Image: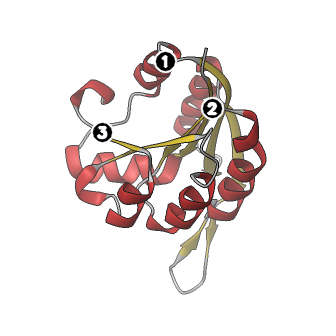
């Protein structure tokens, strides 16, 4: 049975599915799909914390599905920009867990992860899969994955 590790860039998936489809991503449907492919041995969802009740309920739902939720504080800068980026944290966790699994699944369209997946793909025993909104996923990320899954109706609420 294939051992699977899942890494969800929650902000990226939230904003891209909302922009492209006006809908939310269905994490439960993804979980069921992945469980049919093997054993999910680790699933981490990376999000920002704003102290919002709706966000807390969503994070609790992710935990109920089986995700470990990692939170960073949402920072609003005085110039109006904001910060809550998990790229380095995701990369560190992927590098740490990849040697222990057969498949690394990344939910993100962020092209910054292309180098990470290229590095993971050096090990022929580890497969990399990316789920992202096709029109909003970096071409370099799609090309660096062993398999790319465009998010469509089956994975939307």
Name the residue nearer the viewer: 155 or 52: 155
| Residue 143 to residue 70: above or below | below
Q: Are marks 1 and 2 in contact (CB under 8 Å)?
A: no
Nearest to the observer: residue 49 or residue 129: 129
Query: Would residue 28 be seen by someone viewing this image from the given angle?
Result: yes
**CB under 8 Å between discs 3 and 1:** no
Residue lying at 32% horizontally and 64% vertically, measured from the top left:
139
Upstream in sequence: badge 2 or badge 3: 2
Which of the 4 image quarters holds residue 143? Answer: bottom left
Q: Quadrant of residue 91?
A: bottom right
Q: Position of residue 101 (x, y in %)?
A: 68, 33
**Which residue lies under the disc numbered 1?**
37
Considering the image in quadrants, where does the C terminus appear?
top left
Task: Tell me where residue 46 appears, x and y as whole percent.
Answer: 63, 47
Q: Earlier in the sequence, mark 1 or mark 2?
A: 1
Q: Position of residue 113 (x, y in %)?
A: 53, 62
The earlier-in-sequence mark between 3 and 1 is 1
Q: Pick out the residue farthest to the bottom.
A: 79
Determine the CA span between mark 1 and mark 2: 11 Å
Residue sitting at x 31%, y 46%: 17
Q: In this rendering, would 25 be left or right of 121?
A: left
- Residue marked by disc 2: 102
Return the residue nearer the eye: 19 or 88.
Answer: 88
- The front one of 34 and 70 is 34
User: Callout 2: 10 Å neighbours few (<14), some, many (20+)?
Assistant: some
Q: Which mark is residue 151?
A: 3
């Amino acid at each position: 049975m294939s051992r699977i590790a899942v890494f969800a860039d929650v902000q990226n998936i939230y904003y891209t599915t909302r922009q492209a489809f006006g809908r939310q991503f269905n994490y439960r449907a993804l979980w069921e799909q992945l469980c049919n492919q093997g054993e999910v041995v680790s699933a981490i969802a990376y999000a920002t914390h704003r102290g919002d009740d709706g966000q807390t309920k969503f994070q609790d739902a992710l935990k109920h599905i089986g995700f470990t939720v990692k939170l960073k504080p949402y920072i609003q800068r005085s110039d109006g920009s904001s910060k809550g980026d998990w790229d380095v944290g995701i990369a560190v966790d992927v590098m740490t867990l990849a040697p222990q699994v057969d498949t690394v699944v990344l939910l993100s369209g962020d092209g910054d992860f292309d180098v990470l997946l290229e590095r993971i793909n050096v090990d022929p025993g580890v497969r990399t899969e990316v789920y992202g909104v096709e029109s909003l996923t970096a071409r370099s990320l799609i090309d660096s994955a062993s398999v790319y899954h465009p998010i469509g109706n089956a994975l939307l609420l």
